[in-house]
Amino acid sequence: MISFIPENIQAYADAHSSPEAVLYQELAAETRAATTQPQMMVGHGEGLLLKLLVRMLSARRVVEIGTFTGYSALAMAEGLPDDGELITCDVDPKATAIATKYWNRSPHGKKIALRLGPALDTLAGLAGPIDLVFIDADKQNYTRYWEACLPKVRAGGVIAADNVLWSGEVLAPKDADARALAEFNEHIARDPRVEHVMLPIRDGITIAVKR
């Protein structure tokens, strides 16, 4: 995964952001030690961005597509009120076992509901309104996830999608994932239902507000 910001600038930005709590540091360390693709975990800065989005939206109901080891879910849950709910979807019992271990150590873990199984099936059974959706799962289904979620997001709600730059490969896509992400980016660019911005944070994140 390419970082689109020089390392020294990223380090400066991290040093001037709210510090990473010890629980997140331990979760990140175990993810790096116990998984084969630790780069799938959102970083500290992106986790903070998601948590602040939840707070700025006064969100009460969040949906995440792609749990991995639970860093982003925990960050967003921390931004929710005590009676808020975060539904997170994944198909990997091993990665999510790490997630639940750390959620159980946090007072915010009680807000998180894990749904193991294909996310499109879970989404089909969810009713709106949803305040925030975070898409960070299998890239070839991004457009399907978008279409499954957007009708259920409230006006003024947000969909955030990770990895939209795909290490720059969306500029000249050569494999199925890169092509799917390039098509997803074009799909959003043409969607009149949202106002959106693509940010070169880590591997690229698009934030779209429903009109």
Image (cartoon, rainbow, N blue to C red):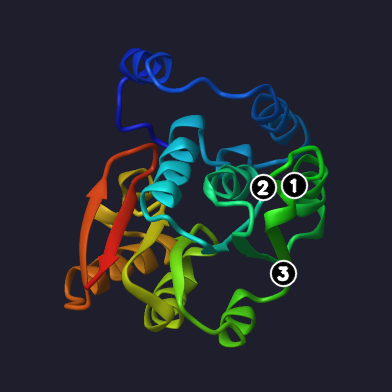
Which x, y percent locates residue 112?
69, 57
Left or right placement of residue 98 versus residue 174 in this view: right
Which x, y percent locates residue 11?
40, 15
SS type, badge 3: strand
Name the quadrant of the N terminus.
top left
Which x, y percent locates residue 78?
58, 43
Q: Which of marks 3 and 2 is nearer the N terminus?
A: 2
* Residue shown at the point (56%, 52%) measured from the top left: 81
Above or below — where is 155 with respect to 76? below
Amino acid type at image mark 3: Arg
Amino acid type at image mark 1: Ala
Left or right placement of residue 178 versus residue 96 in this view: left
Q: Which of marks 1 and 3 is nearer the N terminus?
A: 1
- Say which mark, if any, is on residue 115: 3
Above or below — where is 153 with respect to 28? below
SS type, badge 1: helix
- Say which mark, if any, is on residue 132: none
Contact (Cβ within 8 Å) of mark 1 with mark 2: yes
Location of mark 1 (residue) = 99
Location of mark 2 (residue) = 70
* Residue shown at the point (74%, 39%) measured from the top left: 106
